[in-house]
Amino acid sequence: MSDNLRRYRAIRTALTQGYPGQPTGTVARHLTTLAAMISGIVGSKSTQLPHIATKVPDGTQAESRVKRFARWVRNDKITADGYFVPYAQVLLAQLALQTLVLVIDGSVVGRGCVALMIHVVYKGRALPLAWLVRPGKKGHFPEDWHIALVKQVEALVPAGAQVVLLGDGECDGTDLQHTLEEAGWSYVCRTGCHLTASWEGETFRLDTLGVCSKPGTLIELKEVHFTEAAYGPVMLVCCWAKGYQDPLYLVSNMASADEACRLYSKRFRIETFFSDQKSRGFHLHTSHLSEPQRLSRLLMAACLAYIWVVYLGALCVQDGWVSIIHRGDRCDLSLFQLGLRLLDYLLNEGFTIPVAFYTSI
């Protein structure tokens, strides 16, 4: 049995078993195509449909497989609610035993499009949960897009889970902060030094805090009313880490500035996802798709592929495979790279291929 066939069959089985109920008819056929795309993406390290098709065994010509995948990404009946959300809910249920640290950010995908995404942080990686895609170059998304995405993920979070959302400078809008408060989430978002705030009757620009500080210092102001809209009360933090030329300004509804800064440092984990999906992994930015809805469907396959590979990386560490596939004295590979290496090893040695679209603590 070929490696491509073994990988595909393992993925198809896991997708089917993880789907709510017993998929039949059209749903089963769509899941079969999704399994083929996931397998092809991992096998080819590409999200271009012709490249994916070369790593999918189904007895047809490659061009027929390309057309099949193209029909799938064009099909308006295929939605994230039907073919991604069920797996994202299981993932969050596994991770919600601890505080869920979510990160929101955007990046270029496909040809001439950008995606705004929310991820959950897990052991140095950021696992995708939801996204919105639009035409355009990398830049700021409207605040209502952030709010819409937060509400999508809110519906997936298990009841009673503790959630912290981390965002960059485009996530400091007061309407978004209000939405997060209503959801019962904590948040830490970067904000601009040019904005104003009021504290103890004094109104000031945030950069005046930087003037009063120096590298290695942390300024914490509570009961602040933020911007000219006087939104609040919130906590305002000016954090100037040693070795950096400028301070960082954060707005948060948390109680501790130290905890807010500690959590905010995890925001950069989302960059690992984008680099894994692009230059170090599946080359999502070169998919050649340019229509937002088609790219959104392609992301279902690419994101499930990513979650699976990270699962393999975690399994590699947990079950002691690292010294076999890498080295025994130390490991300088990410979970994503470990997962790819473990998959190659299991295929080469004829072992069973474990597949899951969740991971444990």
Image (cartoon, helix red, strand yellow):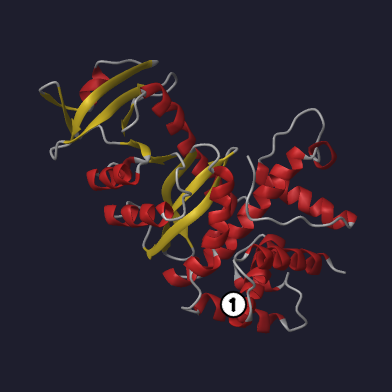
Q: Is residue 128 left or right of residue 237?
A: right
Q: Residue 272, can we see it? A: yes
The answer to whether residue 286 of the structure is visible from this angle is no
Describe the element under mark 1 as helix, strand or loop. Answer: helix
The residue that appears at 30% across and 42% down in the rendered structure is 181
x, y percent for residue 314: 69, 43
Q: Residue at x 76, y 48 (%)?
A: 341
Q: Residue at x 48, y 71 (%)?
A: 79
Circle 1 residues within 10 Å: few <14, some 14–19, many ≥20: some
Give residue 41's quadrant in the image. Answer: bottom right
Residue type marked 1: Val
Q: How many marks?
A: 1
Q: Quadrant of the C terminus?
A: top right
Q: Quadrant of residue 134?
A: bottom left
Above or below — where is 343 with respect to 338? below
Q: Residue furthest left?
A: 201
Query: Label 1 belongs to which residue?
Result: 27
Q: Is residue 235 above or below residue 91?
A: above
**Residue 254, image x, y percentages:** 35, 30
Residue 259 vs residue 339, the one in the foreground: 259
Quadrant into which the N terminus falls: bottom right
Q: Position of residue 203 (x, y in %)?
A: 12, 26
